[in-house]
Amino acid sequence: MLAFAACIVAVLAGGCRLDMHIQPKYLPDKPTTFFSDGRSERPQIPGTVARGELRTDELMYQGTINGTPANVFPFPITKTDLARGQQRFNIYCSPCHGYDGQGHGMIVLRGFQQPPSYDSPHLLNAPVGHFFQVMTNGFGNMYSYAARVSPADRWRIAAYIRVLQLSGHAGMNDVPPAERAKLEANGAPSRNSQNRPPSAGQKP
């Protein structure tokens, strides 16, 4: 029995090799004499594209069509997309722009420069791709959010901005009939939608 046990131990011990633990390797940022630049890490090859990051869709990733800011969305905007856009807007945009997009966010109330209202004429008439590009590249005192907000969410935020613009200029005719009846029953004024902002191409 002792001889048998010794054989078992020998077999098991033979399988406990440390090759993977003590193999030759370079730790991060360690120098080397193998390469002429003295670096163990190799620089990224110019033009390298990470797997899944080949962004050839101009509209989706640049907000343009043939180099011009687009006035359409790259995918259909659903109610779920608008809810997501509102959530992202409240997190990333409302500190400066306010929850209503009028430019009276908490940062502004504390002394920072006020951004323009989304109801200003040049933003009412701006193509929806403009908002995507501003979020992507930054504009004026606003820095880029490309590293913080995904391209799809930037489009959803742009769609929600259109909702804020529409809600500020909508008339009773823009309210669904069932909801309109409730508003009129409560004494809401009835007016037309002549001041409605221009469509963003594909209506959210």
Image: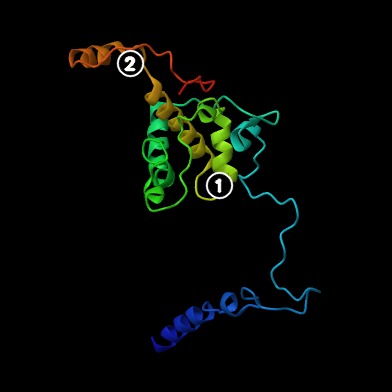
Q: Which residue in the structure is indicated by mark 1?
A: 146
Secondary structure at badge 1 equals loop
Residue in front for this viewpoint, 173 or 84? 173
Up/down of 24 relative to 59, above or below: below
Where residue 19 appears, as percent x and y from the top left, is 60, 77
Residue found 69% across the figure and 69% down from its top: 41
Which of marks 1 and 2 precedes in the sequence? 1
Of marks 2 and 1, the one in the foreground: 2
Most distant residue in the bottom direction: 2
Could you tell whether 169 is left or right of 70 in the image?
A: left
> Type of residue at label 2?
Val
Q: Quadrant of residue 6?
A: bottom left
Where residue 123 appears, as percent x and y from the top left, is 52, 30
Up/down of 113 relative to 117, above or below: below
Task: Find the distance from the CA under tag 2 to the CA under tag 1.
Answer: 35 Å
Q: Are marks 2 and 1 in contact (CB under 8 Å)?
A: no
Up/down of 3 relative to 74, above or below: below
Position of the C terminus, as image quadrant, is top left
> Type of residue at label 1?
Ala
Residue found 40% across the figure and 47% down from its top: 95
Up/down of 24 relative to 165, above or below: below
Where residue 122 appears, as percent x and y from the top left, is 54, 29
Could you tell whether 61 is left or right of 171 in the image?
A: right
How many numbered circles are shown? 2
Q: Which residue in the structure is indicated by mark 2?
A: 175
Where residue 178 appears, as percent x and y from the top left, is 26, 12
